[in-house]
């Protein structure tokens, strides 16, 4: 009884809600930051050969030449994307930003691909 | 030759703020001795003082004590205007802004624990915002977010409980233990 009264004086109704909200924020952040394997390296290939391996740490752009023209790859801290590509359907450009390990954007007509890698790769190989 | 005398009138408020700031600086120095696996994960004991000042003397006084604490601990650690000092300032500023809003919450439902947890989240939020924008842009900080948030939650709650206990403590003349008056 005494313990109960003491607890009541320390924690009011709103305090319990604030603590619950804080806990769910921590859980949400944990799932967000640790759930997926966020990639840390971008691998750019042209005609199957790796031509650039760049860490996702600072902003930079690469221009890669293929049979149709130039594909532009943009890298920013934590993410990468294909900015411009001469392929007719623009599929790899529409994929937007890639962040997770194992994600890839393939510009098949121009034979250029961008793949994100993390600490542990989810798959040994992917067939498309 | 005329001697000019500059007098700086010191009010009782000034003295009280200086005393409370000294207390906060003392706690900051003391907790610097506690080893921490990740820089930035600290109990934030000085926030106990800031919260007590906020609840007893208002937000203005709390802002003064907080600013003096950041400045003086920067001087004492020799990190004045170094990155750590700016991180500390950003944290203190964000936490004061959060408290400026949170102190209007109804007292009947939201006690010191709420204020302390919110201030702790504000503190780490301000620091991380500056660190992420200025010092460590990229994915590295994101991985540490859950650790910082969990530390803010736990230490914020503990500090809040300490604040409620200090506020609920019997007056010094009725206390049975050794006197320990808050300045």
Image: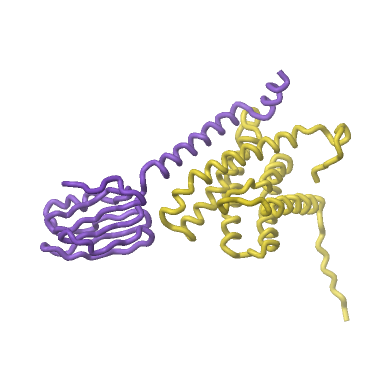
Residue B181 appears at what percent x and percent y?
83, 42
Asked if A127 appears above or below B82 in the picture, the reply is above
Residue at figure coordinates x 65%, y 31% from the top left:
B107
Res B59 seen here: no
Residue at figure coordinates x 69%, y 43% from the top left:
B48
Q: Nearer the viewer, residue B102 or A117?
A: A117
In which quadrant is the N terminus of chain A drawn?
Answer: top right
Residue A33 appears at what percent x and percent y?
42, 44
Q: Nearer the viewer, residue B144 or B156?
A: B144
Residue at figure coordinates x 23%, y 65% from the top left:
A63
Asked if B183 appears above or below B138 in the picture, the reply is above
Q: Tell whether A128 sits left or right of A40.
A: left
Q: Outermost residue, bottom direction? A: B1
Residue A125 appears at what percent x and percent y?
22, 48
Please name the color used to draw chain A.
Answer: purple
Res B19 seen here: yes
State which chain is coloured yellow. B
Q: Nearer the viewer, residue A124 or A104?
A: A124
Residue A122 appears at what percent x and percent y?
30, 45
Residue at figure coordinates x 69%, y 63% from the top left:
B75
């Amino acid at each position: 009884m005494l313990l109960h009264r003491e607890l009541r004086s320390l924690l009011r109704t709103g305090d319990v809600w604030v603590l619950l909200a804080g806990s769910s924020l921590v859980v949400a952040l944990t799932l967000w930051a640790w759930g997926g394997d966020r990639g840390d390296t971008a691998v750019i290939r042209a005609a199957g050969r790796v031509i650039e391996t760049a860490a996702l740490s600072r902003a930079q752009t690469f221009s890669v030449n293929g049979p149709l023209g130039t594909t532009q790859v943009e890298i920013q801290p934590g993410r990468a994307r294909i900015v411009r590509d001469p392929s007719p359907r623009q599929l790899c450009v529409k994929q937007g930003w890639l962040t997770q390990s194992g994600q890839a954007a393939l510009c098949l007509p121009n034979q250029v691909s961008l793949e994100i890698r993390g600490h542990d790769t989810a798959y040994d190989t992917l067939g498309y | 030759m005329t001697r000019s005398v500059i007098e700086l009138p010191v009010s009782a408020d000034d003295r009280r703020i200086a005393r409370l700031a000294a207390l906060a600086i003392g706690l900051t120095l003391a907790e610097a001795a506690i080893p921490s696996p990740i820089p930035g994960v600290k109990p934030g004991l000085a926030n106990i003082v800031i919260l007590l000042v906020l609840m007893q003397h208002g937000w203005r006084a709390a802002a003064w004590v907080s600013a003096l604490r950041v400045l003086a601990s920067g001087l004492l650690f020799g990190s004045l205007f170094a990155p750590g000092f700016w991180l500390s300032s950003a944290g203190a500023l964000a936490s004061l802004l959060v408290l400026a809003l949170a102190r209007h919450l109804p007292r009947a439902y939201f006690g010191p624990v709420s204020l302390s947890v919110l201030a702790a989240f504000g503190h780490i939020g301000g620091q991380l915002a500056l660190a992420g924008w200025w010092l460590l842009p990229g994915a590295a900080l994101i991985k540490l977010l859950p650790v910082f948030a969990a530390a803010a939650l736990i230490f914020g709650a503990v500090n809040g409980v300490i604040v409620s206990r200090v506020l609920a403590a019997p007056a010094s003349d009725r206390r049975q233990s050794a006197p320990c008056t808050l300045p």
